[in-house]
Amino acid sequence: MHPLICRALGRAVELHAGQMRKDDKTSFIVHPMETALIVARANGSPEAVAGALLHDTVEDTPYTFAALQVEFGDAILEIVSMGTENLAIVDWEQRKRDLLQRLEKASVEAKLVKAADVLSNMGSLTEGILRDGEAFWTKFRTPKTFRLHYFDQIRLVTADVQPPWLQTEFDRLLGGLSRI
């Protein structure tokens, strides 16, 4: 394994220790690892795979952009920062619009990481709904229609960097969630 990816995996495991996914059954680190595997399968660079492992660290842990930059450099900082929500924006829809606007100008690697992130999230969401029914949607603060629209917007903004298999899987999961 590439040394950069090993370092990123170690840091992600350390920072996400004790965190759980929305289903309250799955360790959070599964999500960044799955995101990284999707990026690797799409022939992402070592920087993109490392960025995928670290993509939620600034948003969901005390880790800062400054610390990320010192430890992993500018390329990883760009990948992570372009896909990280601005939590200073309180309104969910406005925060997502801000993220989408930034993604339009983002690098191929940042777009690929975000597409993989959302693909992983849609898979987890599908599993939760199939297991727990419609009640699983209540674990989220936003209505189903808002979330599905956001996923579709990510699909559109990242379509230019998605290999055909990723586009197919994205469409399959989004269509399935729309029908549930």
Image: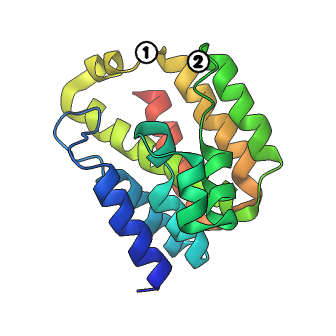
Give the Cα separation between the discs numbered 2 and 1: 9 Å
Label 1 packing within 10 angstroms: few (<14), some (14-19), many (20+): few
Residue 48: image quadrant is bottom right
Q: Residue furthest left?
A: 25
Q: Find residue 81 and report its horizontal and vertical position in percent.
A: 64, 48
Name the kind of residue labelled 1 in the image: Arg
Name the kind of residue labelled 2 in the image: Trp
Quarter the N terminus occupies: bottom left
Q: Find residue 91 and report its horizontal and vertical position in percent.
A: 61, 13
Label 2: which secondary element: helix
Q: Find residue 47 and report its horizontal and vertical position in percent.
A: 59, 72
Q: Is residue 168 visible?
A: no
The residue at the point 45 percent across, 84 percent down is 3
Mark seen at residue 28: none
Of 121 and 84, the residue lying toward us: 84
Q: Pointer 1: what residue?
A: 141
Mark seen at residue 92: 2
Label 1: which secondary element: loop
Mark 1 and mark 2 in contact (Cβ < 8 Å)?
yes
Of 2 and 25, the residue lying toward us: 2
2 or 1: tag closer to the N-terminus: 2
Q: Find residue 139 and report its horizontal and vertical position in percent.
A: 32, 20
The residue at the point 41 percent across, 73 percent down is 7
Residue 146: image quadrant is top right
Quarter the C terminus occupies: top left
